[in-house]
Image (cartoon, rainbow, N blue to C red):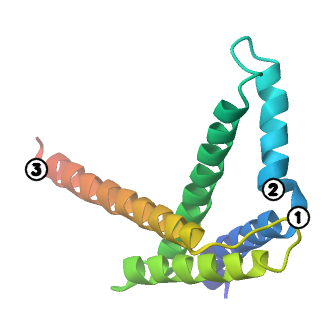
């Protein structure tokens, strides 16, 4: 039971974090745009350009989608490894959770649900899993080199 919890508890907790991002109105596009506008107004180069801050808000929000579902995929991969289907299972889990998260947002005031966000979330999961795979390959290569004395 302890091994199961050590693998799956981080996944459950991260799913709750994602759920809370969707649940609370603090993370609507309008609210994050306002916060960003306030922050930019304090910077010497920021402030006045509404279009620039709008684009920056878009980039930050989409990067958040990539990151939060990338982290979820990496955590699920960790929970499933070393099983053969760990990468595919982690990507599928993150993608399905992204779809249910968007569906949940459709019921929240001020939130919108779009298939485009599911695609971005799915890409974030895939990107994170590619990074995990590359790091594991690099570690194996480095381990072999050390073992041979190179």
Per the model, the C-alpha gap separating discs 3 and 1 is: 54 Å
Give coordinates of residue 75: x percent, y percent: 56, 69
Counting residues from the N terminus, which is met first, the one under dot 3 or under dot 1? 1
Per the model, the C-alpha gap separating discs 2 and 1 is: 6 Å
Q: Is residue 45 visible?
A: yes
Per the model, the C-alpha gap separating discs 3 and 2 is: 52 Å
**Quarter of the view holding residue 117:** bottom right
- Quadrant position of the N terminus in the picture: bottom right
Q: Determine the secondary structure under disc 2.
A: helix
Foreground: 131 or 79? 131
Residue 27 tag number: 2
Give coordinates of residue 38: x percent, y percent: 85, 30
Q: Which residue is mark 1?
A: 24
Circles 2 and 1: CB atoms closer than 8 Å: yes
Give coordinates of residue 32: x percent, y percent: 79, 46
Q: Which residue is mark 3?
A: 148
Q: Determine the secondary structure under disc 1.
A: loop
Residue 88 tag number: none
**Quarter of the view holding residue 8:** bottom right
């Amino acid at each position: 039971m302890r091994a199961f919890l050590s693998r799956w508890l981080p996944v459950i907790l991260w799913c709750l974090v994602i759920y809370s991002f969707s649940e609370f109105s603090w993370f609507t596009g309008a609210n994050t745009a306002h916060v960003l506008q306030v922050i930019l107004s304090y910077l010497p180069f920021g402030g006045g350009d509404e279009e620039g801050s709008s684009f920056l808000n878009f980039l930050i929000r989409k990067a958040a989608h990539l990151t939060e579902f990338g982290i979820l995929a990496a955590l699920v991969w960790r929970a499933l490894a070393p099983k053969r289907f760990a990468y595919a299972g982690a990507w599928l889990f993150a993608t399905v959770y992204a779809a249910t998260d968007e569906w949940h947002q459709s019921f929240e005031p001020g939130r919108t649900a779009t298939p485009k966000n599911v695609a971005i979330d799915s890409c974030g999961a895939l990107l994170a899993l590619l990074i995990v795979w590359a790091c594991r390959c690099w570690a194996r290569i480095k381990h072999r080199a050390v073992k041979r004395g190179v």
